[in-house]
Image (cartoon, rainbow, N blue to C red):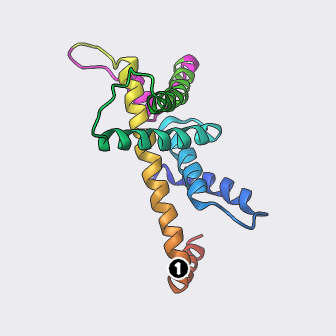
Amino acid sequence: EGFVPIFFEESNVIIKEWKDKTEIDMAKEMMRLTFRIVGRALFSAKLDEDAHIIDRSVGIALEGVIKRIQSIIKIPLYIPTGANLKLKKAVRDMDVVVNKIISNRIQSKERVKDLLDTLIYARDEETGQGLSPKQIRDEVITFLLAGHETTSNALTWTFYLLSEHPEIRRKVIEEVRSNI
């Protein structure tokens, strides 16, 4: 419930940018929208400028991992093949964005009730030990990717299906308008 205002605010920003456009790449726009929402909801950060980096890097990384899985010969990642270098660069690019999110929060010393705050300040009750920087990074990457890519794909397909079924689209529009 607390995230609903973020959903509306970020959606309105994106919709306003569409006003004068005649064509919209919904897959790209839904990726950008969900990245903005995840950034604010989970990390209290505005991530719009980095959405294209994550989007490109995730695509390259997924393609690289799928090719590795399907390959009969498993070339070790330390061998500098074109595919390995491309995959490593994609992971580095994602790391830059995620490390920026984490370091900005730590440097600000700001305490915010969000997932990132929980990860940074979590302590084991018995040992008092916190998460390592790598553990925090891994968790942020997981939530960032799982929280935005799957949702953006679902939204993209929803818009596609609504475009194919005008009678259902009309009902959805009526319902949305009646609840505004």
Q: Residue furthest front?
A: 73
Identity, as a three-letter code, of the amino acid under mark 1: Glu
Tell me what residue is drawn at x 47 percent, y 57 percent: 153
Q: Residue furthest right?
A: 20
In the picture provided, is 82 more to the left or to the right than 25? left
Question: Is residue 103 highlighted in magenta?
Answer: no
Query: Is 159 above or below relative to 93?
Result: below
Q: Which residues are magenta?
A: 107-126
Q: Residue furthest bottom?
A: 167
Query: Is 96 above or below relative to 49?
Result: above
Quadrant of the frame with the C terminus: bottom right
Please count the marks in the image: 1
State the SS at label 1.
helix
Query: Depth check: 163 or 67 in front?
Result: 67
Where residue 144 sits: x, y (%)?
Answer: 45, 39
Tell me what residue is drawn at x 43 percent, y 44 percent: 63
Tell me what residue is drawn at x 55 percent, y 42 percent: 56
Where residue 121 sits: x, y (%)?
Answer: 39, 22
Where residue 146 sits: x, y (%)?
Answer: 40, 45
Query: Is 64 above or below relative to 130?
Result: below
Tell me what residue is drawn at x 75 percent, y 67 percent: 22
Quarter of the image for residue 70 reads top left
Instruction: Report crowding for label 1: few under 14, some 14 to 19, many 20 or more residues within 10 A (C-alpha).
Output: few
In the picture provided, is 159 more to the left or to the right than 77? right
